[in-house]
Image (cartoon, grey):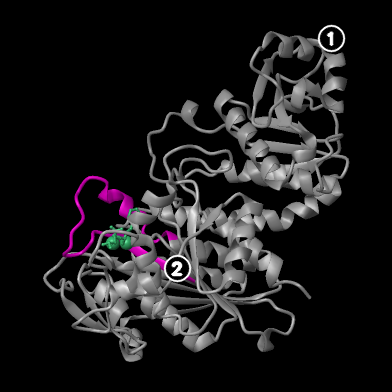
Amino acid sequence: MKISFAAPAMPKSGALVVGIGAGRKPTQAAAEIDKLCDGMLTRAIKASSKFSGKADELLPVVAPPGVPVDRIILVGLGDLKALDAVALQRIGGGLTAHLNQVGASAAAVRLDGVPAGKLAPGDAAAEVALGARLRSYRFDKYRTKEKPTAKPTLARLTVMTDADAAAKSAFVDRDKLADGVFLTRDLVSEPANILHPESFAARCQKLSELGVEVEVLDEKKMRKLGMGALLAVGQGSVHESQLVVMQWNGAPKAKDKAPLAVVGKGITFDTGGISLKPGAGMWDMKWDMGGAGVVTGLMAALAGRKAKANVVGVVALAENMPAGNAQRPGDIVTSMSGQTIEVLNTDAEGRLVLADALWYTQDRFKPTAMIDLATLTGAMMVALGTHQAGVFANNDALSKRLVAAGAAVGEKLWPMPVGDEYDREIDCDAADMKNIASGRWGGASIGAVFLQRFVNKVHWAHLDIAGVTWSDKDKPTTPRGATAFGVRLLDRFVADHYEGS
Ligand code: BES
Ligand code: MN
Ligand code: ZN
């Protein structure tokens, strides 16, 4: 879909979208067009008892008289003063889905005369465009027999605003952000026979085209560094584990500034290993690399928009398979930190790969803060469901900043506890710690305190994204499937706290 911006005008064909505010109050453009088509919009609203002008509502008016367009779509804007970036993105996404469903190939959205809360008109138009683009994502590369009529139709979307030049330039960075989101969604959607640690690393290498410095550590290098925990997870796989380091140095005085570090769990498939998972639903574990997918997409977004910040992304890639040479329950491994771990459950593998990735990252980069993302625990899904992710941290200010960034972009985080009581639960007789607790409760916090033992003294936050990485339902800016939850949040976090002068 091609997205462009233009001054308000009557399109010669296609679909035209105009806004209606709360209480069925027409925007200026809606009133103007209503006159041209002899009051048909007013009559359509009257005839539709359910359409009230609330945000996310749509009312199609097909074949209107007096205008050259095929259809006019009335879109609810709700309370105009409450229109913020997320609301505008949702509107853009919702109308894109509708236009694709009804078979429209071109559409124009009139945003002139829509005062959008605190946003400048150009920014408001760019947010609608971003929402439209985010919703247009599709992972269909393996569908060879889809009927043409079932495919999305919308090829061109024009957002019309008096501030079209400002909107166009405001969209440039947002378009790069969407590129990053799409990269994450592509990675998360790929099946594990295609995306394994080496092929994932190869996709990371491509980020060098954007100016990202990419290094791949293979098993030999990791063995030399003493990454016994990470290597144990992948030892039963025919694919070599990989650790990829991606550096974006965009800060003005690049060399002087310690980076922000972002670390992702990248289990390209999690069978559970010898502690094998049940068969039903195991296919979901192709997205157990969601954290690594977010880190990679974030690096692409930051480099794409030339963010003025130093950020290092690290992804820990391994495949957790049962095999004759796989690790066994009860094995004791030595991590790069020197701490030993009794692996009582080979299905608690994310924390093992992250143990070495986190230690390595803080040791090498001395980051100002370190954030990890991981589809770490089923317990996280039990606690928060699929609408919010949990944030665990050893630093309150960092946690609050992440929660605020999430709220601003519509990727909500809920603070979860770490602490001594949880930490004591992984003390162990045979080694420095065990990778699971003895009891069943508080599993998401148990995973977090395990990770905390590998962050040394660095300010650290852990996002357990198990519940939000994949969606079974369409959402306004996210079609069902891979969500890329975390990319927009961290892009915002970087913009708010690392790009100041
Ligand atoms: N990747 C899973 C967690 C997961 C489950 C993510 C479902 C998304 C959806 C993780 O490696 C795992 O298996 N965790 C175990 C930990 C347990 C053995 C302590 C779990 O949550 O059951
Ligand atoms: Mn597991
Ligand atoms: Zn896992």
Q: Categorize mark 2 by other alpha carbons within 10 Å: few (<14), some (14-19), many (20+).
A: many
Q: Residue furthest front?
A: 421
Quadrant the N terminus occupies: top right
Asked if the magenta segment contains residue 280, the reply would be yes
Q: Position of residue 365 (x, y in %)?
A: 53, 85
Q: Earlier in the sequence, mark 2 or mark 1?
A: 1
Instruction: Please tell me whether mark 1 sits on a helix, a strand or a loop.
Output: loop
Let me know if residue 199 appears in the view.
no
- Give the extent of the magenta segment: 263-290
Q: Categorize mark 1 by other alpha carbons within 10 Å: few (<14), some (14-19), many (20+).
A: some
Q: Is residue 48 left or right of residue 220?
A: right
Let me know if residue 26 appears in the view.
yes
| 452, 361: nearer the viewer | 452
| 143, 258: nearer the viewer | 258
Q: Is residue 198 shown above or below 19?
A: below
Q: Which residue is mark 1?
A: 38
> Is ligand 3 less than 8 Å from the beta carbon at label 2?
no
At 75% from the left and 26% from the top, the residue drawn is 22
> Is ligand 1 less than 8 Å from the beta carbon at label 1?
no
Q: Position of residue 487 (x, y in %)?
A: 56, 59
